[in-house]
Image (spheres, rainbow, N blue to C red):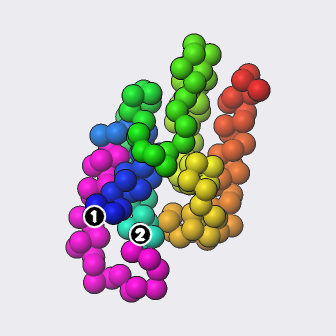
Amino acid sequence: MERHWQRLYRLAWRILGSAEDAEDASQEAFMNAWERIDTYRGDAPVGAWLSRIAAHAAIDRYRRRRARRELPVLAEEEAPQFASAAPGPDRSAAGSEFRAALDRARAGLSAHQRAAFDLKAVEGEDFQTIGSLLGCGASSARQHFFRALRKLRAELEAYR
Protein backbone atom coordinates (compact mmCIF):
# COMPACT_ATOMS: atom_id res chain seq x y z
CA MET A 1 0.00 0.00 0.00
CA GLU A 2 2.78 2.44 0.89
CA ARG A 3 4.55 1.76 -2.41
CA HIS A 4 1.51 2.58 -4.56
CA TRP A 5 -0.40 5.16 -2.50
CA GLN A 6 1.03 8.29 -4.12
CA ARG A 7 0.47 7.11 -7.69
CA LEU A 8 -3.12 6.06 -6.99
CA TYR A 9 -3.85 9.30 -5.14
CA ARG A 10 -2.33 11.41 -7.92
CA LEU A 11 -4.32 9.51 -10.56
CA ALA A 12 -7.57 9.96 -8.61
CA TRP A 13 -6.82 13.64 -7.98
CA ARG A 14 -6.27 14.28 -11.68
CA ILE A 15 -9.63 12.71 -12.50
CA LEU A 16 -11.57 14.24 -9.61
CA GLY A 17 -9.85 17.57 -8.97
CA SER A 18 -10.40 17.36 -5.24
CA ALA A 19 -7.95 16.24 -2.58
CA GLU A 20 -10.71 14.88 -0.34
CA ASP A 21 -12.39 12.92 -3.13
CA ALA A 22 -9.02 11.62 -4.37
CA GLU A 23 -8.20 10.33 -0.92
CA ASP A 24 -11.60 8.62 -0.69
CA ALA A 25 -11.23 7.09 -4.16
CA SER A 26 -7.71 5.85 -3.34
CA GLN A 27 -8.92 4.22 -0.15
CA GLU A 28 -11.85 2.72 -2.00
CA ALA A 29 -9.42 1.33 -4.59
CA PHE A 30 -7.32 -0.38 -1.92
CA MET A 31 -10.43 -1.83 -0.28
CA ASN A 32 -11.67 -3.10 -3.66
CA ALA A 33 -8.26 -4.60 -4.40
CA TRP A 34 -8.21 -6.37 -1.04
CA GLU A 35 -11.71 -7.77 -1.62
CA ARG A 36 -10.78 -8.91 -5.14
CA ILE A 37 -7.21 -10.07 -4.57
CA ASP A 38 -8.18 -13.50 -5.89
CA THR A 39 -8.87 -11.93 -9.33
CA TYR A 40 -5.27 -10.76 -9.72
CA ARG A 41 -3.77 -13.11 -12.33
CA GLY A 42 -0.18 -11.89 -12.19
CA ASP A 43 0.08 -11.20 -15.91
CA ALA A 44 0.58 -7.46 -15.25
CA PRO A 45 2.46 -5.64 -12.50
CA VAL A 46 0.52 -5.11 -9.27
CA GLY A 47 0.85 -1.34 -9.71
CA ALA A 48 -0.93 -1.45 -13.07
CA TRP A 49 -3.70 -3.61 -11.61
CA LEU A 50 -4.12 -1.20 -8.68
CA SER A 51 -4.06 1.83 -10.99
CA ARG A 52 -6.87 0.39 -13.05
CA ILE A 53 -8.95 -0.20 -9.93
CA ALA A 54 -8.20 3.36 -8.74
CA ALA A 55 -9.09 4.85 -12.13
CA HIS A 56 -12.44 3.05 -12.08
CA ALA A 57 -13.12 4.15 -8.50
CA ALA A 58 -12.33 7.77 -9.38
CA ILE A 59 -14.38 7.72 -12.58
CA ASP A 60 -17.36 6.23 -10.73
CA ARG A 61 -17.06 8.93 -8.05
CA TYR A 62 -16.76 11.61 -10.75
CA ARG A 63 -19.91 10.35 -12.50
CA ARG A 64 -21.87 10.36 -9.25
CA ARG A 65 -20.72 13.92 -8.52
CA ARG A 66 -21.50 15.06 -12.06
CA ALA A 67 -24.99 13.57 -11.82
CA ARG A 68 -25.52 15.63 -8.66
CA ARG A 69 -23.74 18.65 -10.27
CA GLU A 70 -21.10 18.79 -7.53
CA LEU A 71 -18.02 19.53 -9.62
CA PRO A 72 -15.38 21.54 -7.76
CA VAL A 73 -13.37 24.53 -8.90
CA LEU A 74 -9.81 23.53 -8.13
CA ALA A 75 -7.78 25.56 -5.69
CA GLU A 76 -4.00 25.76 -6.12
CA GLU A 77 -3.41 24.58 -2.58
CA GLU A 78 -5.31 21.34 -3.29
CA ALA A 79 -2.84 20.17 -5.92
CA PRO A 80 -0.88 17.11 -4.80
CA GLN A 81 2.68 18.01 -3.87
CA PHE A 82 4.66 14.96 -4.99
CA ALA A 83 8.15 15.03 -6.42
CA SER A 84 6.96 13.44 -9.66
CA ALA A 85 4.03 15.83 -10.14
CA ALA A 86 4.16 18.51 -12.80
CA PRO A 87 5.83 21.84 -11.95
CA GLY A 88 3.69 24.23 -9.97
CA PRO A 89 1.65 26.96 -11.62
CA ASP A 90 3.00 30.44 -12.26
CA ARG A 91 2.34 32.50 -9.12
CA SER A 92 1.80 35.77 -11.03
CA ALA A 93 -1.68 37.23 -11.58
CA ALA A 94 -1.63 36.05 -15.20
CA GLY A 95 -0.57 32.56 -14.07
CA SER A 96 -3.39 32.42 -11.52
CA GLU A 97 -5.89 33.57 -14.12
CA PHE A 98 -4.66 30.92 -16.56
CA ARG A 99 -4.79 28.23 -13.86
CA ALA A 100 -8.42 29.14 -13.06
CA ALA A 101 -9.30 29.02 -16.79
CA LEU A 102 -7.55 25.65 -17.12
CA ASP A 103 -9.45 24.28 -14.12
CA ARG A 104 -12.77 25.44 -15.62
CA ALA A 105 -11.85 23.90 -18.97
CA ARG A 106 -10.83 20.59 -17.34
CA ALA A 107 -14.14 20.51 -15.43
CA GLY A 108 -15.92 20.45 -18.80
CA LEU A 109 -14.16 17.26 -19.88
CA SER A 110 -15.65 13.82 -19.38
CA ALA A 111 -13.97 11.65 -16.76
CA HIS A 112 -12.35 9.50 -19.44
CA GLN A 113 -11.11 12.54 -21.36
CA ARG A 114 -9.66 14.12 -18.23
CA ALA A 115 -7.97 10.88 -17.18
CA ALA A 116 -6.57 10.20 -20.66
CA PHE A 117 -5.26 13.75 -21.00
CA ASP A 118 -3.59 13.79 -17.58
CA LEU A 119 -2.14 10.30 -17.90
CA LYS A 120 -0.62 11.17 -21.30
CA ALA A 121 0.35 14.83 -20.90
CA VAL A 122 1.38 14.83 -17.24
CA GLU A 123 2.28 11.26 -16.35
CA GLY A 124 3.74 10.38 -19.76
CA GLU A 125 1.89 7.08 -20.09
CA ASP A 126 1.48 5.41 -23.48
CA PHE A 127 -1.97 4.88 -24.99
CA GLN A 128 -1.87 1.12 -24.41
CA THR A 129 -1.38 1.67 -20.68
CA ILE A 130 -4.01 4.42 -20.58
CA GLY A 131 -6.46 2.16 -22.35
CA SER A 132 -5.87 -0.66 -19.88
CA LEU A 133 -6.33 1.75 -16.94
CA LEU A 134 -9.58 3.08 -18.37
CA GLY A 135 -10.86 -0.31 -19.47
CA CYS A 136 -10.78 0.41 -23.20
CA GLY A 137 -8.43 -0.11 -26.11
CA ALA A 138 -5.45 2.03 -27.06
CA SER A 139 -7.35 3.63 -29.95
CA SER A 140 -10.20 4.66 -27.63
CA ALA A 141 -7.68 6.08 -25.16
CA ARG A 142 -6.12 8.04 -28.03
CA GLN A 143 -9.57 9.38 -28.99
CA HIS A 144 -10.27 10.45 -25.40
CA PHE A 145 -6.91 12.23 -25.26
CA PHE A 146 -7.30 14.09 -28.56
CA ARG A 147 -10.89 15.09 -27.84
CA ALA A 148 -9.73 16.50 -24.50
CA LEU A 149 -6.86 18.28 -26.20
CA ARG A 150 -9.20 19.80 -28.79
CA LYS A 151 -11.62 21.00 -26.08
CA LEU A 152 -8.86 22.45 -23.93
CA ARG A 153 -7.29 24.26 -26.88
CA ALA A 154 -10.64 25.78 -27.82
CA GLU A 155 -11.32 26.91 -24.23
CA LEU A 156 -7.84 28.34 -23.72
CA GLU A 157 -7.45 30.00 -27.14
CA ALA A 158 -7.21 33.46 -25.51
CA TYR A 159 -3.99 32.42 -23.71
CA ARG A 160 -2.06 31.40 -26.85
Report the predominant secondary structure element of the magenta stretch. Answer: helix
The mark total stands at 2
Res 90 quadrant in image: top right
Mark 1 nearby-residue class (10 Å; few <14, some 14–19, many ≥20)? few
Res 33 quadrant in image: bottom left
Whether residue 22 is in magenta: the answer is yes
* Residue 128 versus residue 83 in the image, above or below: below
Task: Give the residue at mark 1.
Answer: 1
Task: Answer left or right for 100 relative to 71.
Answer: right
The residue segment tinted magenta is: 21-46
The reply to whether residue 23 is in sight is yes
* Residue 25 versus residue 153 in the image, above or below: below
Q: Farthest top residue?
A: 93
Task: Answer left or right for 136 relative to 142.
Answer: left
* Residue 1 versus residue 22 in the image, above or below: below
- On the image, the x and y values in percent for residue 29 come to 31, 61
Q: Residue at x 30, y 40 (%)?
A: 20
Q: Residue at x 32, y 43 (%)?
A: 21
Mark 2 nearby-residue class (10 Å; few <14, some 14–19, many ≥20)? some
Give the Cα separation between the discs numbered 1 and 2: 10 Å
Q: Amino acid at mark 1?
A: Met
Q: Earlier in the sequence, mark 1 or mark 2?
A: 1
Residue 47 is tagged as 2
Q: Amino acid at mark 2?
A: Gly
